[in-house]
Amino acid sequence: AAIEAQRAEDERRLQLMAAVRGEYNAGVQFHIQEEYQQAVNSFKLGLEKNDQLPALWANLSLSYAGLESYDEALNAAEKAMELATEETPLDSGFYQTLGGIYAAKGDLNKANEAYLEAATLVADTDPQAAAASYYNIAATMINSGQNTAATEALNKTLEADPNYSEAHYQLGLILLGTEMEKAVNHLKTYVELTPDAPNAAVAQELLSQLSP
């Protein structure tokens, strides 16, 4: 009888795991299709079955962010961080999203902490992703008028990915009037890398004014 009871319990757990996985996979697909409310609904159904999985909370946070429901997104993200372990860590993408959530809520310090964590997690394995995180730090600094900190972050962006064109453009703008030669070089590189970018015409006009 004990063996039968254990077998029944094991079967129940397997069915529950399959149901949770099904809701998780459905939520991911909805999110990919930008059907964020349906994604939220699927992740919440999964959490009703098992609310101890950080991946479910992390993806719920991502979908709430897609809906621009930043308070709910932050609550879900905090739950994901609370539950994460060495065996079930949160990835760089999670911290990238978390940085965006904090930025949307106006907390630039926490946004930059999250972006830095995102960059650190992939610095050795995905330098382009690391560059994107450093650039996000730079963007928050530019938006708050902190050009020195922005310059530092932009230089880190280019250390990780020398072809990150927007970093060249922003450095070119920041250095105008202080380090003209560097500014010109960055603007030229931006135009060379992305001649059809929205700001390429602006950069070209600046170069025509600055070049002898």
Image: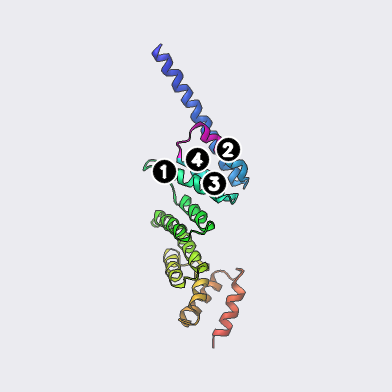
Mark closest to the chain's N terminus, 2 or 4? 2
Q: Residues within 10 Å of mark 1 (few under 14, many from 20)?
A: few
The residues bearing labels 2 and 4 have C-alpha atoms spaced at a distance of: 10 Å
Q: Residue at x 57, y 76 (%)?
A: 203
The residues bearing labels 2 and 1 have C-alpha atoms spaced at a distance of: 21 Å
Secondary element type, mark 4: helix
Queried whether the magenta region covers residue 5, the answer comes back as no
Secondary element type, mark 2: helix
Q: Is residue 58 above or below residue 154?
A: above
Secondary element type, mark 3: helix
Q: Which mark is residue 26?
A: none
Q: Amino acid at mark 1?
A: Glu
Q: Residue at x 57, y 69 (%)?
A: 194
Mark closest to the chain's N terminus, 3 or 4? 4
Quadrant housing residue 80: top left
Q: Which mark is residue 42?
A: 2
Do the residues bearing badges 2 and 1 touch, measured as CB atoms within 8 Å? no
**Magenta residues: mostly which secondary structure?**
helix
Q: Which residue is mark 3?
A: 72
Q: Amino acid at mark 2?
A: Ser
Mark closest to the chain's N terminus, 4 or 1? 4
Mark closest to the chain's N terminus, 3 or 2? 2
Q: Which residue is mark 1?
A: 82
Q: Position of residue 101 (x, y in %)?
A: 52, 54
Q: Nearer the viewer, residue 128 or 19?
A: 19
Front: mark 3 or 4: 3
Q: Which residue is mark 4?
A: 56
The residues bearing labels 3 and 2 have C-alpha atoms spaced at a distance of: 15 Å
The residues bearing labels 4 and 1 have C-alpha atoms spaced at a distance of: 13 Å
Please indicate whether residue 207 sits to the left or right of residue 86 in the image. Answer: right
Q: Position of residue 146 (x, y in %)?
A: 47, 70
